[in-house]
Image: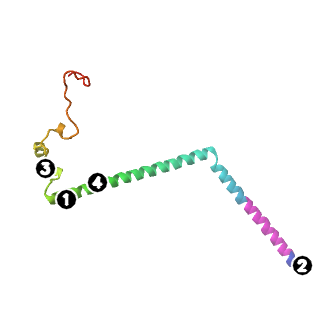
Amino acid sequence: MPRRTFWLVAGVAIGAGSSLWMEHKVRRTVNQAAARLQPDALVTEVGRSARDAASSAGDRFRDAVSTGRSEMQRREEEIWAELAQRGSAVPPGSLPAATRAAEPDPAGTSRSRRYRGLRPIRATRGSTSHPAT
């Protein structure tokens, strides 16, 4: 009989202890969830996630710009190397400023006429589309 009594008491003690432990754990989880859903906590969490998203987007943008610039410089160097290999061009930084200013226009036209689609506006007598000049 003492064995049965021992196991009965042990079972009751283990059951009561595990019930109290589980109640404590559930209560703590519910309190934490309630604290996270408070208006102050929600505002704080939304602000934190917005700051994190903005900073990561800014970092990605800066990385993209820096990658684009380095690729642009690399490609420009490749193009200048190809042109130098053909002997048809001199890189713009290799000539002194005085020499560059004295260079003739390669197309033989004035600056305003370089672009084919643009023509100078000529004022004509009796023209209504332009004010009299």
The mark nearer the N terminus, 1 or 4, is 4
Quarter residue 112 falls in? top left
113 in relation to 90, above or below: above
Crowding near pointer 4: few (<14 within 10 Å), some, many (20+)?
few
47 in relation to 7, above or below: above
| Quadrant in the picture for the C terminus | top left
The colour mode here is rainbow
Query: Where is residue 53 shown, x and y percent of the image?
Result: 48, 50
The mark nearer the N terminus, 1 or 2, is 2
What SS does tag 3 mark? loop
Crowding near pointer 3: few (<14 within 10 Å), some, many (20+)?
few
Identify the disc placed on residue 1: 2
Query: Where is residue 116 shown, x and y percent of the image?
Result: 20, 40
Identify the disc placed on residue 72: 4
Residue denoted by label 1: 82
Question: Which residue is painted at 87% across and 74% down in the image?
Answer: 5
What SS does tag 1 mark? helix
Q: Which residues are magenta?
A: 5-23
Q: Amino acid at mark 2?
A: Met
What SS does tag 2 mark? loop
Q: Amino acid at mark 1?
A: Glu
Q: Amino acid at mark 4?
A: Met
**Cβ–Cβ below 8 Å for labels 3 and 2?**
no
